[in-house]
Amino acid sequence: QVQLQESGPGLLKPSETLSVTCAVSGDAVTSSSYYWGFVRQSPEGGLEWIASILHPGNTFYNPSVESRVAISVDPSKNHFSLTLTSVTAADTALYYCRANFFWGQGIRVTVSS
Amino acid sequence: EIVMTQSPTTLSVSPGERATLSCRASQSVNSDLAWYQQKPGQAPRLLIYSASSRTTGIPARFSGSGSGTDFTLVVSSLQSEDFAVYYCQQYHRWPQTFGQGTKVEIK
């Protein structure tokens, strides 16, 4: 079974760029068996899908963040990454990476000046 | 986008009793519906996919049903470890969307 582990900064200032990386073990990130993706959970508890990628390059983005987001795969490191530009306090959340229905443990991101 | 609406928001149930959770989609998602359980401090855990298929390791007391726009998750006899928040999610169309959750609490 695939296992996932997020990493990234815990604290950002408004207008900065968020980068979250998800390390994959148990399978190759080049596998076409998985939609690799990210979901975030607000402090109030709501879940929001952000983006997914199907290797080698089919990407899917939530329209709510599409102008600010990118997802990519790095086969050399067997990980995939999310980049979210121009963050605001509304981007404060717990960010989870996913492989189909399997989830990482999440990383808490706070945006505050 | 497809809006997922769960009911009730909170369900108070005694251990050993049956819990019935509902999820409604604003348009048909066929059977492309998953149920997750989330406990405090943990990531959501998949219970059911394709509306009615239990994932590996999930006890038989959890069952899912429905297709189209109306779905149900039943926990036949609640155990202490089942008190948690439950979310439904559709993956029929992008963007994937989640319900707002149902909290199952001890009565």
Image: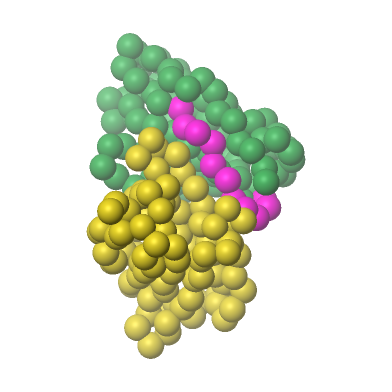
Chain colours: A yellow, B green
- Identified at 54% across, 69% down, the residue is A53
In the foreground, A19 or A36: A19
Vertical arrangement, residue B98 with respect to residue B84, above or below: below
Which percent across, then down, holds residue B68? Answer: 73, 37
Question: Does the image show residue B47?
Answer: no
Query: Is A112 on the left-hand or right-hand side of B11?
Result: left
Vertical arrangement, residue A51 with respect to residue B66, above or below: below
In the foreground, B106 or A58: A58
Q: Is residue A15 magenta?
A: no
Which percent across, then down, holds residue A83? Answer: 43, 69
Question: Does the image show residue A113?
Answer: yes
Which percent across, then down, holds residue A97? Answer: 40, 60
**Which SS does the magenta portion mostly show?**
loop
Query: Is A12 on the left-hand or right-hand side of B62?
Result: left
Vertical arrangement, residue A37 with respect to residue B86, above or below: below
Query: Is B26 on the left-hand or right-hand side of B21?
Result: right
Q: Please identify the quarter of the rendering in which residue B66 is found.
A: top right
Q: Give the quarter of the figure containing the C terminus of chain B.
A: top left
Magenta residues, as a range? B92-102
- Identified at 58% across, 46% down, the residue is B97
Q: Please identify the quarter of the rendering in which residue B34 is found.
A: top right
In the foreground, B91 or B31: B91
In the foreground, B38 or B49: B38
